[in-house]
Image (cartoon, rainbow, N blue to C red):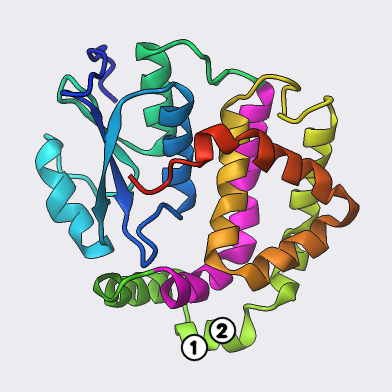
Amino acid sequence: MPREVGSSATPSRPYVLYDLASKSGSTWSLNPWKTRFCLNYKQLEYRTVWLEYPDLKPSLKPFFAKELDLYTAPTVAFPDGEHVMDSWDIAKKLEEVHPEPSLHLDAPYVAKVQDIMPKIMGNLKTIVSVQVPKNLLNDAGQAYWRQTREERIGMTLEKAETEHSGIDRWEKAASDIKQVSAWLKENEGPFFLGSEPSFADFQWAGFLLFWQRVSSEHYEHFKTVVGSDLEVHEKLLEAVKPWSERDSH
């Protein structure tokens, strides 16, 4: 990833966040949530460009010198014209350009959450594949989603819904989710580090907000899985509200 330092954003030259469009007109996807948290936390001027899934490649390809295998959201345009893709790469670049307030990217909890998240989402991928098009996507993104997700999960969305989208999927993810609960309880909170937020909080809060928007039924399954530990997750969501409230522009 290019490492040159970009100039500071101003109202006339804001950052641009390329995010995924939805029926509600607000952010929903896990990875864009992480980036939006970072921009809001660092109080940077930015505007949002909403893209449907089929528009990702034609919209983003011109900004990158080399052909990429996949063009994804989030992508951020920095005020100096550089474009950075991937929430982790964006966080590193933002931390370099705007070191305060810090995202504490080197905190152990950041790596721990980063490592465990694919395990959790891997167990829930059939649910995501079914619920996202039903509840969030506009018509423009439906065919793209079906094609790519059916290839990814190896079955039709209809089969995924009838055979692989129940609470049993949450039970498979339960041990890893309970590990996250344990990390949140290691310090007094409400954040993983205690009183100071870090990128670990934005990763996990993004996960929670993602599920709230994907399906209220499945968020209830999450609450069942965490049981008596629900409070630490709810306190985290309350604590990050100053940086989650801006979600539609």
Which image quadrant is residue 114 in? top right
Q: Which mark is residue 170?
A: none
- Residue at 36% x, 63% y: name it: 22
**Callout 2 touching callout 1 (CB < 8 Å):** yes
Q: CA distance from mark 2 to mark 1?
A: 5 Å
Placement of 166 over or under 24, stated as above or below: below
Q: Which stretch did the figure color magenta?
A: 108-136
- Front one among 83 and 154: 83
Placement of 215 over or under 201, stated as above or below: below
Q: Amino acid at mark 1?
A: Glu
Placement of 2 over or under 57, stated as above or below: above
Q: Amino acid at mark 2?
A: Glu
Q: Position of residue 213 (x, y in %)?
A: 53, 61
Is residue 241 shown in magenta?
A: no
Left/right of residue 123 with respect to residue 242 in the rendered view = right
Left/right of residue 37 with respect to residue 84 in the rendered view = right
In the image, farthest residue toward the right:
228
Residue bearing the label numbered 2: 161
Left/right of residue 223 with respect to residue 33 in the rendered view = right
Element under label 2?
helix
Residue bearing the label numbered 1: 158
- Residue at 24% x, 15% y: name it: 6
- Residue at 84% x, 25% y: name it: 188
Element under label 1?
helix
- Residue at 18% x, 54% y: name it: 57
